[in-house]
Image (cartoon, grey):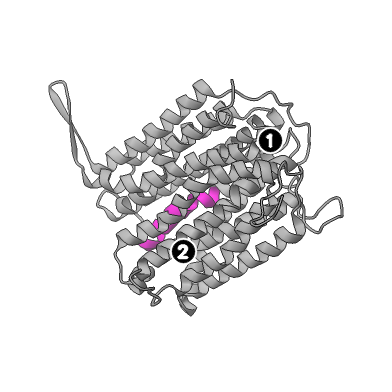
Amino acid sequence: MRDLFGVNPQVLALALARMSESVGNSFLIVVLPLFIASDFVSGATFGLTEVFITGLVLSIFGLINSPLQPFTGKLSDRTGRRKIFVLFGLTLIAVASFAYSLASAYWHLIFLRVLQGIAGAFIIPTTVALVNDLASEGNRGGNMGTYNTFRLVGFGVGPIAAGGVVAAGPYSIPIGATTLTLTGFDAAFYLAASTATLAFFLVLALIRDPDIEPSDSDESALSGIDVFDQTGTQLLDPVFALGVVSFFMAVGIAVFATLGEIVNSQLNQGPEMFGLQFAAFVLAQIFLQAPIGRATDFYGRKAFILTGTILLVPTTLVQGFVPGVSIGIVSDSWLMFSARFLQGAAGAMVFAPALALAGDIAPADESGSTLSVLTMAFGFGVAAGPLLSGILVAWGFAVPFAFAALLAGVGVAIVLTQVEEVNPPRRAIPVVGRVT
């Protein structure tokens, strides 16, 4: 089938499936804290506070799936199959989402979140590897950017809709002579399960495994992750270097997440504005990832990764100094929104191009394990960011942002010295004022 605007139709179908699954999965970010605080959940807390349990339930998804990704990615390389891993993961997501409606104890939620973390380990590296397999050298950036755009649309829509679904309950559904009553929580969990089920059938019907040779490597998943460059020309392996940069970027994004109450107090704003500021990063990614990814197919990957990493430094740092810095009629709150949006633009220049460059580097039969280095690093960064900010904010509001900006500065040095283009750009980056 012919590509649509340089995007493989199967990549587009896979992107739609991930968007559907992401809507339901991101529902839980809003719904689970409300569910834990409700009267529907009780039981032993094992000496833990309800606040800690809430944080554990939310973070355990990333803490479980991130370290497992190299193993599932490697396994998909060895079998030469990706689709079955995605279908299995979507099945687990759907079952766990439905099972939340039956949960009544804290440990039920922790168990189900662990199950979803395992599901994420089957879905995340194999879908990225599928995009890489289905794309070609000349359109890999555009395909990666489009895939990430759709996934982020789902991630952004879910939390916005979730609160409304819960608040609008209970629901009365007539079935014959009887009426079925659903709480707002039940409706949210069923909706999350249905979006994963829809994604399952989209993948089942529209995706086929590409014709790739199974990997004959006997190395374990972790032994296949090279920290140092085996050629001796650089210090770090280029894929590992891209993973480190992705980790630093994710930390910079996520330090904001834990500071909701402090940000609202510092900026004298409500939780709705904080939600909008949190979403600003995702909005920028949605608008920019696809065109930036496409541009890297023509102008090369490194220039965009380097520019994005450089921009992460000021756009992250400035967030720590927004309180009290109104500019004319622009309030502190909208300045924070702008900083988050610009940080998102910088992130759009880093992650999809980094995935595309790692895909350029990866051997054809090892893209699952190779790309899992970046997806694992990003997941760890998202988990580490809130933890770091919760510790560092004790020394001042600006400290978490300054630390994240420092990490981004280290990332600039890594990209400059350890990352090189694999394929020569097809076009030179235009320079304003240059006479041709």
Front residue of this view, candidates 289 and 436: 436
Position of 85 relative to 234 (above/below)? above
Query: Type of residue at label 1?
Result: Gly
What residue sits 63% from the left and 47% below the top? 353
Asked whether 55 falls inside the magenta stretch, the response is yes
Residue 144 pos. (x, y %): 59, 40
Residue 291 pos. (x, y %): 55, 43
Question: Where is mark 1, residue-wise?
Answer: 138
Main SS of residues in magenta? helix
Q: Can you tell which quarter of the image residue 294 is in?
A: top right
Position of 206 relative to 436 (above/below)? above
Asked whether 106 falls inside the magenta stretch, the response is no
CA distance separating discs 2 and 1: 33 Å
Q: Is residue 92 left or right of residue 71?
A: left
> Start and end of the magenta stretch?
47-64
Q: Earlier in the sequence, mark 2 or mark 1?
A: 1
What residue sits 76% from the left and 37% below the top? 363
Question: Where is mark 2, residue-wise?
Answer: 339
Q: Is residue 436 left or right of residue 53?
A: right
Q: Can you tell which quarter of the image residue 423 is in?
A: top right
Residue 122 pos. (x, y %): 57, 37
